[in-house]
Image (cartoon, grey):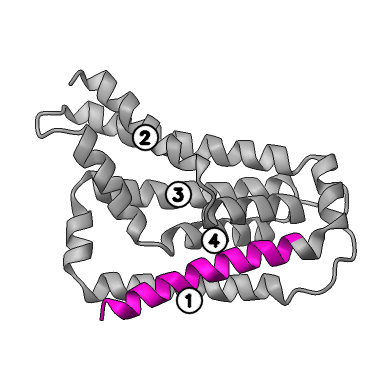
């Protein structure tokens, strides 16, 4: 397979996952709606950083080491699931909406909090590294040049970051935020329930692997 075609196919397969809603999408959308564009961007940067870590592990064959560890994989899965349950519960039990400012004031500490939330949400699911490994097993070959592998990794990270930037641009607009103010509790409960259920599934799967 032509190296350039390999890079495009790898990034294209990853981009298809954007069509499937999951915890990464929920956490970026919720941050953008609740706290504005900067918060959504920092959350998206955290998610993209997690994708960079897991895709790098998959690219260099370390996914096998993680899964072969058994106990390590199970521990990461259960801790990650517990984090998503905790964060989902926080959204579910949040106070009643009081209205949001049109443009939230940027705060450095809050920005890093959103970054950590995005990063931890992405890393909470260690099966992501297996997903990346499965993509690479289809698109990459032993004779694929190193530059093509590096380009594929950079393409994955760039696609992840651009998608999250697009999400925060869309969901931080005034019209979207006005809708959010009117329906804040319902949307927070929806996001919280989605994250908590996904976390419970991870904890259950990790427990079943014991």
Q: Quadrant of the N terminus?
A: top left
> Judging from the image, what secondary structure is the residue with disc 4 in?
helix
Alpha-carbon span between mark 4 and mark 1? 16 Å
Alpha-carbon span between mark 1 and mark 3? 21 Å
Would you say 97 lies left or right of 4 here? right
Identify the residue position indicated by label 2 in the image: 13
Foreground of the two, 112 or 93: 93
Occupied quadrant, residue 141: top left
Which of the marked residues, 4 or 1, is nearer the chain's N terminus?
Answer: 1
Foreground of the two, 93 or 145: 93
> Judging from the image, what secondary structure is the residue with disc 1 in?
helix
Identify the residue position indicated by label 3 in the image: 49
Q: Nearer the viewer, mark 2 or mark 1?
A: 2
> Judging from the image, what secondary structure is the residue with disc 2 in?
helix
Occupied quadrant, residue 164: top right
| Residue 210 against residue 132 in the figure, above or below | below
Residue at (10% x, 34% y) in the render? 142
Residue at (57% x, 50% y) in the render? 25
Identify the residue position indicated by label 4 in the image: 116
Alpha-carbon span between mark 4 and mark 3? 10 Å
Q: Quadrant of the C terminus?
A: bottom left
Neighbours of disc 4 within 10 Å: few (<14), some (14-19), many (20+): some
Alpha-carbon span between mark 2 and mark 1? 29 Å
Alpha-carbon span between mark 2 and mark 3? 19 Å
Residue 176 on image: x %, y %? 80, 44
Alpha-carbon span between mark 2 and mark 4? 27 Å
Identify the residue position indicated by label 1 in the image: 82
Would you say 165 lies left or right of 175 here? left
Q: Nearer the viewer, mark 4 or mark 1?
A: 1
Q: Which residues are magenta?
A: 187-210
């Amino acid at each position: 397979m032509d190296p350039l075609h390999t890079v495009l196919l790898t990034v294209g397969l990853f981009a298809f996952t954007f069509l499937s809603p999951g915890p990464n999408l929920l956490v970026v959308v919720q941050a953008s709606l609740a706290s504005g564009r900067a918060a959504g961007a920092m959350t998206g940067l955290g998610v993209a950083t997690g994708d960079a870590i897991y895709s790098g592990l998959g690219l260099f064959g370390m996914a096998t080491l993680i899964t072969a560890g058994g106990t390590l994989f199970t521990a990461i899965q259960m801790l990650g699931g517990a984090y998503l349950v905790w964060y989902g519960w926080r959204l579910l039990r949040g106070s009643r909406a009081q209205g949001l400012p049109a443009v939230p004031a940027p705060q450095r500490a809050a920005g890093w909090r959103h970054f950590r939330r995005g990063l931890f949400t992405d890393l909470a699911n260690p099966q992501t590294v297996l997903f990346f490994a499965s993509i690479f097993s289809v698109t990459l070959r032993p004779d694929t040049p190193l530059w093509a592998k590096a380009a594929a990794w950079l393409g994955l990270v760039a696609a992840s970051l651009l998608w999250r930037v697009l999400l925060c641009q869309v969901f931080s607009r005034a019209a979207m935020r006005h809708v959010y103010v009117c329906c804040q509790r319902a949307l927070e409960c929806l996001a919280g329930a989605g994250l908590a259920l996904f976390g419970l599934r991870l904890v259950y799967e990790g427990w079943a692997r014991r």
